[in-house]
Amino acid sequence: MSFIDLMNYSSFDCGAILLSLTCLVYNIIQKHTDKPQNRLYMLALANIIITAVCNLVLMVAEPNQYLDYHSRVLTDTFNYLYFLLHTALPVLMFYYALYATHSLDRVKKKGRIILFVPFAVTELLVLTNPLTHAVYYYNDALEFTRNNGELVIYAVAAFYSFLCFYYFMRHWYGISGKRKRILVYSLICTMAGLLVQFFMKGVQTELFGESVTLFGIMLAVEYNEDRVDIETGVNNRKAFLLDMASYFDADVKLYLTTVRLTNLERDKRIINASGDEALIEIVGLYLKTVHPRYMTYHVTPETFALVLIGQDEEERDLQAERISKQFMEGFRLNERDVHIQGMILCAETGPSLQSVEDALLLCETPIPNKENGKILKGEDLSFLHYNAKLEHVLRRAIAQHRFMVYYQPVYDLKEMRIASAESSIRLHDEELGELHPVDFITAAERIGIIDELGDYVLREVCSFLHSGVPSDKGIRFININLSLVQCMRNDFIDNILGIVKEFRVSPSRINFEITENVAAEDYALVSRIGQGLRAHGFRFSLTGYGTGYSNIYSIFSMEFDIIKLDKSLLEETNRSDKGWVVLKNTIDMIHTLDRKVTIVGAETKDQVEKMRELSVDWVQGYYFSRPLTPEKIAEL
């Protein structure tokens, strides 16, 4: 055979080698080599490359075997090697699909044995072929002749291909419409290559079709840049949700360890002051040294999750202790030790970890400050169960309209009478008891019902204003607290305008308050919302000033109507004369900026008299009244 003829006949095999080699190199460059599925995929690529090389050798040796003994030996050897290796490809891809879809544990041990039997039969047919000629043989004219065993191999290959396709389509949580279409196209390429070569032995399309399939799998499955957190190089939140859903669906026994950075903003400032490396990057790089990258997830800005499968509790605990020790020792940055505050939570599938929601609770639920710096597991995670119950209660309460809105009167110190009232939402649950906003607002934001709660409060307040009771009692406006999450809604102002108009209430009778620490998170957004509210006639105020986040910039940069001072400033006056000096100067400054002043937390007559001396505009506290129901307000 001339070189030109060889190139013409071997074009499909050369294409298969080039395409498979490209996929292999890509995986190595992208470092997609650590997962079991990565290694099986690369093994499948190597299988195609080697069997394609076998085909090339056969193209040269086979025509000369009746003339040359060495050619006969090469033909027999590489034919045998071709069938021995290539028969293993379908089962390789089947197990690849099991690993990629986290379905290995879905198949019981007995089922695995049964599923392995067809492959064992085909391999046995090939291994014994020199004696039995069950798969192929050369006739007296030294022509390659198929036997019934090859039909069995094709049938088994089709069986494993179907299973592979089934697991990807049925049990792969990472699948999307585009990826489905790529996999369907890949299957068509495989079937087309098999059918063409089955009916036309001289056209070597089988390997090329399979290499196209593996290229498609690289695009649809192995390409996982959309799963990677750019900042740390580990898996991102999306990958965590998809994988955990897959694990729970397959009933996989796993251990989940979450590493929570409990003082992220403070630690960021420390690190940024000493270098350019980001805190998250430092922690992420470290975690990759103690845990496989592909089983490490950056779930929230302050939380990493580590998943252990096929390990035991002792291994999990040793890993947690190692990470905790590193946090205590600190991280090296720019030739100095940087200490990061963190906490480690450990759980395993069982009572405390049964769903993706439980896994997210482990990553996101607020942690009691007293637990900071500890390794929590077992009974230590009781607060997780409380939060899970709380979220269920909140969802049920919002659906059944079981929340109550209370009103705490705010008094005008000059006239010594009610001037306004502050609304607050509460919930009474038979199991959890009386719940105040501080108990559930964070949970409401986390589960996405904070907008519904905000609308609920606004509707209750508008209904109360429309009843005429507030006007009869001298209540000029009612305060409603806002969260930053509410302000982020694109239709926030249009939505509240619609509710106010529905009840025919003047916007000037509603004062929206935002806490100082929330305003500090995004001054630009809060300023824009404040301008929009005031433009439509609403009042807009800053509350909680003096809680430790105090920033004078927030007072004069945004057009607040009222500055509400936190009760901590008033409490400080009981401890020292300096407290009075600070309070007096703060009030004078706010008045100079032409803002009204409200002080929260008045509990004694002496405090009220002092507030009058300091010319405070309004006072709110238990000295006057606790929060009341609308019915109690009517009785005042």
Image (cartoon, rainbow, N blue to C red):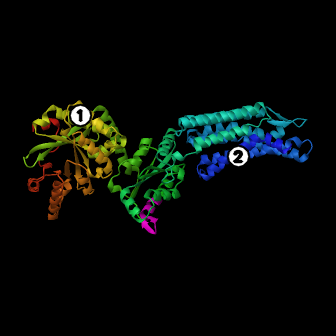
Other residues around mark 2 within 10 Å, as few (<14) / some (14–19) / many (≥20): some
Q: Quadrant of residue 481?
A: top left
The residue positioned 45% from the left and 44% from the top of the image is: 350
Residue 325 covered by magenta stretch? yes
In which image quadrant can residue 263 be found? bottom left
Q: Amino acid at mark 1?
A: Val
Query: Could you tell me residue 503's position as x and y percent?
Result: 21, 31
Quarter occupied by the N terminus: top right
Name the one closer to the observer, 253 or 17: 17
Image mark count: 2
Q: Nearer the viewer, residue 328 or 303?
A: 303
Q: Quadrant of the C terminus?
A: top left
Can the viewer see residue 342 in this picture? yes
Q: Tell me if residue 360 is in the magenta stretch.
A: no
Mark 1 crowdedness (10 Å alpha carbons): few <14, some 14-19, many ≥20: some
Question: Disc 2 or 1, which lies upstream in sequence?
Answer: 2
Residue 80 appears anywhere in the view = no
User: Which mark identifies residue 18?
Assistant: 2
Residue identified by numbered label 1: 500
Q: Secondary structure at mark 2?
A: helix
Q: Magenta segment range?
A: 321-337
Residue 602 lies, in percent from the top left, at 14, 52
Task: Give how far across and how far down residue 313 sits, in percent.
Answer: 49, 52
Left or right: 565 with respect to 246?
Answer: left
Name, please, the residue furthest toward the left.
Answer: 415
